[in-house]
Amino acid sequence: MLSVSRNVFASIFARIWSGVMQFAFTPVYVALLKPEAYGLVGIYSTLLVSTLFLDQCVSPVLARELGRLGSREGTASEMRNLLRSLEVLSLATGSLVGVMVYLAAPYIGGHWINAGGLPRDEVTSALRLMGLVIACQWPNNLYCAGFIGLHRQDQATNLRILFTTLQWAGAAVLLWGVAPSITLLLSWQAANFALFSAMLARRLWRLMPKASASPRFDGRKLRSVGRFALGTLVIGMLASLLTQADKLLVSKYIPLDQFAAYSLAFTLASPITLLVAQPVGSALMPHFSRLISGGDRSGLAREYHRWAQTISVLALPMAGALATFGKPLTMLWLGRGSPLVDPLAILLPWVAAGTLVNTVLMTPYVLQIAAGWTRLAIFKNVVALTLFLPTLVIGVPRFGPLMGVWGWLAVNLGCYLIEAPLMHRRLLTGELGAWWGRDTLLPMVVTALLFGGSGLLAAPDQSVWSGLAQATSTAGLVLAVLVALLPYPRAQAGALLRRLAAAR
């Protein structure tokens, strides 16, 4: 069985490759499709994430239950039946969501999206194809959760790299060589995701422990995990509203070309989530579940702080670079003459700050889910929504996209100041001070001071390459200071240096 660290790094490697593909080919898509048509790609992402809460009663259950059952003898049949049962539910749910998006396409295209100069028929056709893409992509989440529960993310890494390359590079070749068409792009994505889902399913079933009987749908097993599944479903639904309400409202009140800038600001900040929060969180959930099940509180506290510090070290240099040197980085990415550079530069610091706070909240959230305690997250999301939605409805038409990103930051700061203390009081009594002070707040202050000073030294007419060099060097300095400052990263760095010295 792979260690937690190796699981994290296997997942990070695949996500790094995904990030490389996304950042390499997004400017190609924007240039070939033009900003208005590319805004529909942002609409697809919003639709997908807005509906993914329905997967929260399936994939987290599979990861958690496989992690728990895998440490016991004689559970092979139970594990296989669980996978088959959740597989049926996932395929049915994905198909239903795809059909709903297809049927709603004329209304969304005609009455919600501000299409600007795009013909309504073209927008409606693209939206219908989005339903097909969502249905083909949907099972990926379940199968990836299965690899997580078995602690074999390494077995999914090569498939993810292959199909991510096909997804991004193949689409770019088609757009350039055949036609710069959003429908062609979405058709390619649907075919790619369908094949990826089939390959993931085949490999996961081969990894499952062998049993004498064939796997079957087990309604009794589903009922036994129903309470946890219902809790994660409600959390996912409320979290989806919190994270996507701004995008849904912004897409209604601004044209698609401006929505493209709003969507791309979150894309630029996404490496903080994709490379840090998601791989660490997915590996920690079954790990925390085993520690809680074994009653090892001291081990749980140690692992909790260890990974909280790791998240800070990995996330803060990226967030600081985006917040301080967003404009030269955007010009390097999209090109100096892109009309999206200036609106992106305004939005990016706020998006990066909100994404950073959301990322450092990953360890408290994962601990809640691993413990099966869903009520706090539900209550927090309900309270946040009652404040967030009216603010967006009033503020977005008046202040535009900035109100959306301000709201994103405010929601995450509220969780940091209110939800985290409540979680620690129940699950890790006496550990809040260390998490707040040493693991998160101190690294944030140090990062803000170093990047703030570097930003003050930057020339007003700084070139793209000068900005890139300053952002990179400052991020490297922040990384080195945080590694030296925090106990666990410092110990890991020392061990690595000793191994390198011994190897000589």
Image (cartoon, rainbow, N blue to C red):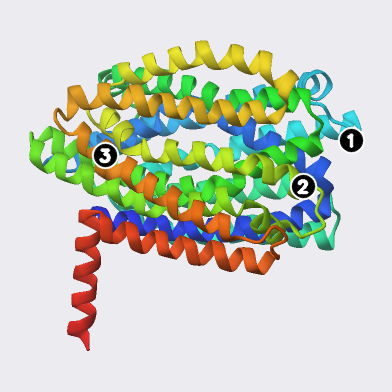
- Residue 325, position as x, y percentages in the image: 60, 55
Disc 1 vs disc 3: which is toward the camera?
3
Q: 372 or 101, which is in the foreground?
A: 372
For disc 3, the neighbor class at 10 Å (few under 14, some 14 to 19, many from 20) is few
- Residue 120, position as x, y percentages in the image: 88, 28
What number is the disc on residue 1?
A: none
Helix, strand or loop under label 2 = loop
Q: Give the amino acid type for the residue marked by disc 3 in the picture.
A: Gly
First in residue order: circle 2 vs circle 3: 2
Count of numbered badges drawn on the protein: 3
Q: Give the amino acid type for the residue marked by disc 1 in the picture.
A: Leu
- Residue 364, position as x, y percentages in the image: 29, 33
What number is the disc on residue 118?
A: 1
For disc 2, the neighbor class at 10 Å (few under 14, some 14 to 19, many from 20) is many
What number is the disc on residue 437?
A: 3
Q: Is residue 473 left or right of residue 45?
A: left
For the point 41% across and 40% down, the residue is 359
Q: Which residue is mark 2?
A: 340
- Residue 339, position as x, y percentages in the image: 82, 48
State the image quarter where residue 356 is shown.
Answer: top left
Q: Give the amino acid type for the residue marked by disc 2 in the picture.
A: Leu
Q: If the image is split into quadrants, where does the N terminus sit? A: bottom left
Helix, strand or loop under label 3 = helix
